[in-house]
Amino acid sequence: SKSRSPRKSSNNNVQVPFSGTQNIPPLLSLRASGSLREIVIDGSNVAFGHSNGKHFSVKGLQIAIDYFVKRGHKVVAFVPQFRQKHNQTTNRNLLLSLADKGYVVFTPSREVNGRRITPYDDRYIIQYAAACEGVVVSSDNYRDLFMERLDWRTTIERRLLMPTWVGDMLMFPEDPLGRHGPNLSRFLRFP
C-alpha cells in the first residue's frame, strides 16, 4: 500500500498527496464565452423534491437529467451509493441505467457492523461544480459549506439553480440571480 504522506523527490521538491480536485483536468476548452456550463445535480435533493419528500424518485432524477441534456448540457447527478440497493429507490434498474450512461455518479457509502457510513455527498457536489465551474441544481442553500472554501462560496452564490416541481413538470426561475441578474439562458452559459 502506498503511503499518503508527503515525500521528497530527487529534486528536493515535496510531492503533495491527493487533495480533492488534483485529478480533475482543466476544462478550459469547454469554458469559451457563451458555451454551456456543465450541470451538476444534487441527486438526493432533486429525487426527493419530485416526490415531495416521500421517497427517492428516480423518475424525477431522469426528468431533471433529460431537461438539461435536451438543452445540450453535459450533466452529472451525484447519488449516494446505497441507493443502488433494492428498496432504496423507486426504480433501481432506471437508476443503474442512468449510471451506465454516465449521468449518475455514486458517492461512497459502506456498512460496518450493520451501520451505514455515508460521507457527506454535498461536498462532492460542490467540489465538482467548483472545479468545472458548473451549475448546481438543488433546493439546498449549502449554508454549512458556504464558508469552507472561496471557490465553493462562489459556486453557491453565483451558480445555484433551484428547481420547482409541479407533479412531473420541472420548472426553473427565468431570473435565477434575481430581477437584475442574467436570464436563465445566460445563467447556464459561460460569460
Image (spheres, grey):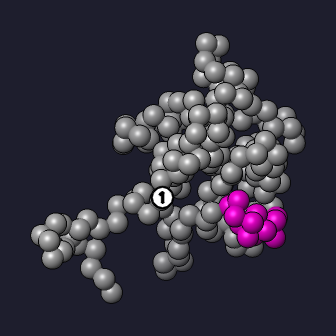
Magenta stretch, main secondary structure class: helix
Q: Quadrant of the N terminus?
A: bottom left
Q: Is residue 22 above or below residue 146?
A: below
Eyeballing the image, is 30 above or below 4? above
In the image, is residue 71 above or below residue 88?
A: above
- Is 94 contained in the magenta span? yes
Q: For the magenta stretch, what is the residue range?
A: 91-104
Rendered residue at 77%/49% (across/down) = 69
Q: Residue at x 49, y 80 (%)?
A: 113
- Can I make out residue 28 in this image? yes
Residue under pointer 1? 25
Query: Which residue lies at the image location 18% right of the left edge and 74% below the top edge?
Result: 9
Q: Is residue 123 left or right of residue 173?
A: left
Q: Where's residue 109, x and y in %?
A: 54, 69
Q: Badge 1, how many Cα within 10 Å: few under 14, some, many 20+?
A: few
Q: Which type of secondary structure does the marked residue at label 1 adopt?
A: loop
Q: Position of residue 41 (x, y in %)?
A: 65, 48
Taking the image as shown, residue 32 lies to the left or right of residue 146, namely right
At a point 63% along the width and 59% down the height, the residue shown is: 79
